[in-house]
Amino acid sequence: MPTINDIAKICGVSKSTVSRVLNGHPYVSEQKRQEILSAIEESGFTPNSLAVQFRKRKTSAIGILTPQVDHPYFAALVQSLSNACTAKGWKPVIFQTFGDKKRELDVFAKLKQRELDAIIATSSALEAHLLARCLENGPILICNEKYEIDTTVCSLDEESAAYKLTMHMLQTGKKRLLFCLDHTSPSQEARYKGFLNALAARNLKEGGKRIEGMVSIEDGIRLGTYLFHDKQLLIDGIFAGSDFVAAGILHAAKQHQIAVPENCAVTGFDNHPISQITDPPLTTYDNEIEAMARKTAEQLDMQLSGNINVPKLFQWQGYLVPRHST
């Protein structure tokens, strides 16, 4: 009696590819699918019926993987994804990984164990090749980060967004800018590239500095206190990376009598409601996370319904929200 390994050898594919065809899994070309189905028919291969039933069991549970649920941006994104999944009739299950690779792998293993029907990852600490290997466990979609793997990705064009926001500051006459980011990731590096490109477009290649580890209001206060305490400003503009960090910087500026934006301009990112109540109101960038979340759920719905959809990158441009801090 032929086995799944025999079918894989006949077709020159991996065992997991044959398994995908047996399960009606997407991301197998139609030509290869037909080759495998023909080999199955000609060889007389019959999958174990109990195993097939187990593989096709549905839980309606969709895992949402996030590094931190208390991070303002990820909190908003997870809420939008949860709402979008619930609207489709699924049960969202939140997994907080704290950027730990083992925790992530444990979550992705739940697909193979059929505890989840699919996973939406908002960020991953795994290298691209490891994340790609996890796709063999079941459907994984990405919402937020941009990874070069064979799955659907919904994300903001971070490079373009940072370019526009930085150029906005430069057009107000600022020349010595500080770029803040939380932790190194593909999206943060793309954002930094956009920042540098804007400086280069103005022939200010030496006009930008970078600092990491900026996540919270408290981080912004500490940074602002350090920058403003002696009023000898070495910078005249801050790309804060998030509205919460920017709010902390504005608080420190007020405490040290630094006029914003006259002495130092400040921009946030994300267009969180806090950006409307800072003093002065904060210039920021709207990343359209609700639209991203809806598109992710729509693409996942197609996949789980058995429609073969080609993995695709969906990118949003977002838009600048100018206020009085620049």
Image (cartoon, helix red, strand yellow):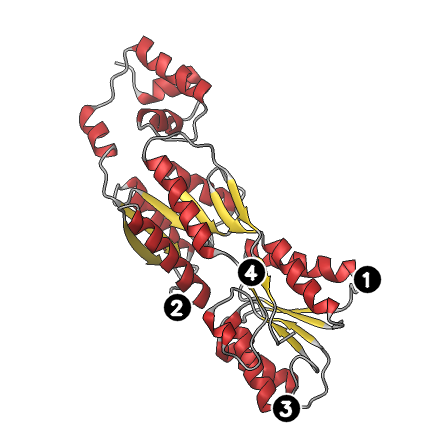
Label 3, label 1: how far apart the Cα atoms are: 31 Å
Kindly identify the residue that appears in the image at 43 percent across and 31 percent down: 27
Label 3, label 4: how far apart the Cα atoms are: 32 Å
Which mark is nearer the camera, 4 or 1?
1
Query: In the image, what residue type sits under mark 3?
Result: Gln
Residue that label 4 marks:
184
Quadrant showing the C terminus: bottom right
Residue that label 2 marks:
70
Q: Residue 147: x percent and y percent? A: 52, 46
Secondary structure at badge 3 equals loop
Considering only order in the chain, which callout, 1 or 3, is on the residue closer to the N terminus?
A: 1
Label 4, label 1: how far apart the Cα atoms are: 26 Å
Q: Residue furthest top?
A: 42
- Which of the two residues, 251 or 141, is positioned nearer the viewer here? 251
Considering only order in the chain, which callout, 2 or 4, is on the residue closer to the N terminus?
A: 2
Task: Give the number of the disc on residue 325.
Answer: none
How crowded pointer 1 is (Cα within 10 Å; few <14, some 14-19, many 20+) is rated as few
Considering only order in the chain, which callout, 4 or 3, is on the residue closer to the N terminus?
A: 4
Query: In the image, what residue type sits under mark 2?
Result: Asp
Answer whether residue 157 is visible to the viewer in this image. yes
Q: Residue 139: x percent and y percent? A: 37, 39
Considering only order in the chain, which callout, 1 or 4, is on the residue closer to the N terminus?
A: 4
17 on left or right of 244: left
Considering only order in the chain, which callout, 1 or 2, is on the residue closer to the N terminus?
A: 2
Secondary structure at badge 2 equals loop
Task: Give the number of the disc on residue 257.
Answer: 3
Residue that label 1 marks:
203
107 on left or right of 167: left
